[in-house]
Every structure is written in structure tokens, then in C-alpha cells.
Amino acid sequence: MKFSELIGQEPAIGLIKNSIARNRLAHAYLFAGPDGVGKKTCAQIMARTLNCMAGEAEPCDACRSCTKEFHPDIHLIKPKGASLRIEQIRELQNSVAYKPYEGKWKIYILEDADKLTEAAANSLLKTLEEPPPVTVFILITSKIEKALSTIRSRCQQINFSPIGEEKILGFLERHYPDAEIEKRELAATLAEGSIGRAASFLEDEDAFGRVEEIREIYRIIGQDDLAPFTIAEKWKERKEELGDFFQILTLLYRQSLWQNIEGTKEKLASINSALVAIGKTEAALARNANVQLALEQLLLTLAKEREENA
Ligand SMILES: [Zn+2]
């Protein structure tokens, strides 16, 4: 893959290509931005470009270095379990001491850099403070607020943005030509700027059924007094899918906000308060609130809102 094939990250790629072309590489980069927008892919392209024997602004995809599946000088380090551990950083430090095996540069890509334990981060900091020659570190994070400020201050930060819906749709048309148009459009909308999320939606066979199920919940809100309890009972066991539940419900309420944009002030205020209630419930569950109770409460609130504004 080449830089030119990455979608919607022109400013980030411009900065990277510029520093390669002018031979002014930072010792360490921090690629920051939401999940699924191309940070890791970009880091891998950068690593391959640096070691490409053609020495151009893009990897040639043909030389001995570019065609290697596993390049001995390009290291990808991921969290083990929930964190990036000090043993992993010590291992990195041991290997940093050696010259590149065959490439021009040694590149260390650290995924989920926000998951460095404090000890691991402090240890890495020492390496970043006395950077070894011909070595580039690329730290990746989707939670920049969690990355330690001492680490951040040692890196050149490059920001990646959410990708526009139109661009995601274009990508899906090219890569999933056989998917139904309605599914592609829905995937692009639900993706919230992430190509990765859009693709996994299209690849998940159950995803569309789940959307239909949540649409049905949205439709019957306020019509059946028992529904809040039966729905909450059913969804309390589906913790993995609750993210989708909230996202799709939010989307449906937002759509209804647009459809009612000419409506009365009361109607708009009421849809808005439904959206606030959904957001609050999601936040409460992130703090480990009881799923069943929280969902019951939410659905009762939404039913009341619907009844008052029927
Ligand atoms: Zn090459």
C-alpha cells in the first residue's frame, strides 16, 4: 500500500512525506486520532518508505525491502493483554543497541501507546531522551488524553482526523462492490469517520439484523407499557452490543431531529432531551452502572417523552 491510497489524511501525510523528503525526521512521532482512520497503516507505509531501496517519496512495492513480509528492521509492538509492559520496552531497548540488519532505518511502531504502564513509559522515556542513531519510533494512540505528557513532549505529534462520510462511502463502493447500496450507506453513516468501523460493519453478518432490531425498539417506544422491562431484560446479557445499541438509537433520534427541524419548540426540546438521556445512560454504563436498571430507566424516560409529544 502507498500513502496515495490512504483516504482523508492529506495534512498528516503531507507532514510525513515532507520530513522524509527533506531528510528531517523526528526521532519519535505520536500518531493521534480516532480508531480506524489509518494511523497504523500510515506508520507501516512510512516504515517501508524509509527502507525502500528506490529512495522515493512512496514505497516502490518492488524492491527487496518492500516485498518482504516481515522486515527485520521494522518492529510492531502491541499491548500484551491490557497494557504495554516494561518487559516489552526492555526488549526494545536491547534491540535498539544494534545496527539495522539490512535496512537504512530501524523503525519501532508502538500500538496503543496510551496503554504503556507507568514503569514502561518511564523506561521508554529514557530511550526517547537519548535517541539512538538511524532509529525512528512511531507511537500510535486513539486516546491522546491518556498518553503521558512526558512521552508526548518527546514526540512530534501528527494528528489524524475522522474521515468524511462521502469519502467512506467511496471507499466502500470500491472495496465492497457486491454489498447492497443500503448497507453501504448505513455503514458509512454509522462509521462516525472510521473506515475500519465501516468495513467491520459490512463484514459482520449480524450487524444489519441488529440495526433492524433497534429500529423496531425505536418504533415501539411509548406504545407498550411492558416493553422497557422486556427490552432491558433482553439487552442486559448483550454487553458487547450495547455500543451499537446506543449509537443506532442516537442516530434515529438525530434523524428525527432533522425531520422535525420545522416543528414546534417543544417537540425539538423533547427530542433533544431524549438524546441527552441516551448520552447520560451510556456514560453511566461506562462507569459500570447496572445495565438492566439503566436501560429500564432510559426506555421509560424515552416512552414518557414520546407520549407527551405524540
Ligand atoms: Zn522499495
Image (cartoon, rainbow, N blue to C red):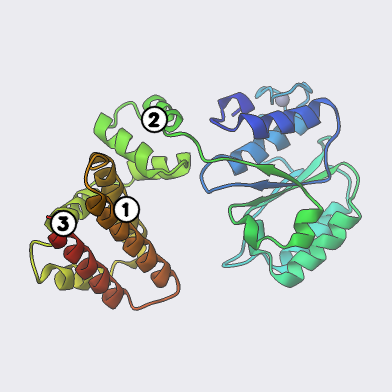
Looking at the image, which residue is at 9% across and 70% down?
225
Q: Quadrant of the N terminus?
A: top right
Image-quadrant location for residue 259: top left
Query: Helix, strand, or loop for circle 2?
Result: helix
- Label 2, label 3: how far apart the Cα atoms are: 35 Å
Of the residues shown, which amino acid type is indicated by label 1? Answer: Thr
* In the rendered image, the vertical position of residue 10 relative to residue 35, given as above or below: above
Which is closer to the viewer, label 2 or label 1? 1
Q: Position of residue 24 (x, y in %)?
A: 86, 33
* In the rendered image, the vertical position of residue 197 relative to residue 104, given as above or below: below
Of the residues shown, which amino acid type is indicated by label 3? Answer: Asn
Residue 180: tell me if it is visible.
Answer: no
- Label 1, label 3: how far apart the Cα atoms are: 18 Å
Q: Position of residue 55 (x, y in %)?
A: 79, 23
Which is closer to the viewer, label 1 or label 3? 3
* In the rendered image, the vertical position of residue 269 relative to residue 172, given as above or below: below
Q: Earlier in the sequence, mark 2 or mark 1?
A: 2
User: Mark on residue 250?
Assistant: 1
User: Mark on residue 169?
Assistant: 2
Query: Helix, strand, or loop for circle 3?
Result: loop
Q: As drawn, is 120 to the left or to the right of 128? A: left
Q: Which residue is tagged 3?
A: 309
Few, some or many residues within 10 Å of mark 1 (<14, 14–19, 20+): some
Q: Earlier in the sequence, mark 2 or mark 3?
A: 2
Query: Helix, strand, or loop for circle 1?
Result: helix
Looking at the image, which residue is at 27% across and 75% down?
292
Looking at the image, which residue is at 20% across and 70% down?
300
Few, some or many residues within 10 Å of mark 2 (<14, 14–19, 20+): many
Q: As drawn, is 171 to the left or to the right of 14? A: left
Cβ of disc 2 within 8 Å of ligand 1?
no
Q: Position of residue 86 (x, y in %)?
A: 74, 68
Looking at the image, which residue is at 22% across and 63% down?
302
